[in-house]
Amino acid sequence: MPLGFFVTQIKAKDGDEGVNGEVRYELQPNPTNANQDWEKFRIDGITGQLFTNAEIDRETQDTYYVSS
């Protein structure tokens, strides 16, 4: 996958009303993941759309772990 490729859209809901119910998205580093997979992706903090932040090659690495 090339840089900037759309991967998926993350969706979450908060039961609060108004501003208190707004959801923001971000990727968090995982201290148990030595590959730093989260750096290979970026997420739009408002929409939750996940994109590649680097070229992704399945032949080099077939699984990536990210958490938000």
Image (cartoon, helix red, strand yellow):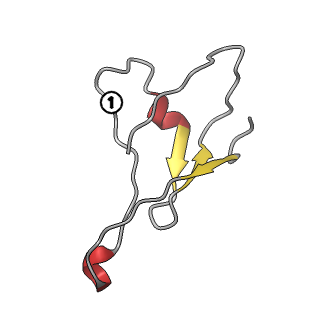
Q: Residue at x 48, y 58 (%)?
A: 11
Image quarter where the C terminus lies is: top left
What is the crowding at mark 1: few (fewer than 14 residues within 10 Å), some, or many (at least 20)? Answer: some
Q: Is residue 3 above or below residue 19?
A: above
Left or right of 63, for residue 3: right
**Toward which corner of the image does residue 40 lie, by quadrant?**
top right
- On the image, the x and y values in percent for residue 7 come to 65, 45
Tell me if 19 is positioned left or right of 34 in this view.
left
**Circle 1 is placed at which residue position?**
30
Q: Viewed as shown, does residue 31 lie left or right of 68?
A: left
Measuring from the top left, give residue 34's x and y in whole percent: 38, 17
Residue 15: image location, x then y, percent = 29, 72
Q: Nearer the viewer, residue 53 or 65?
A: 65
- Give above or below for 28 relative to 56: below
Closer to the camera, 7 or 17?
17
Amino acid type at image mark 1: Asn
Q: Quadrant of the N terminus?
A: top right
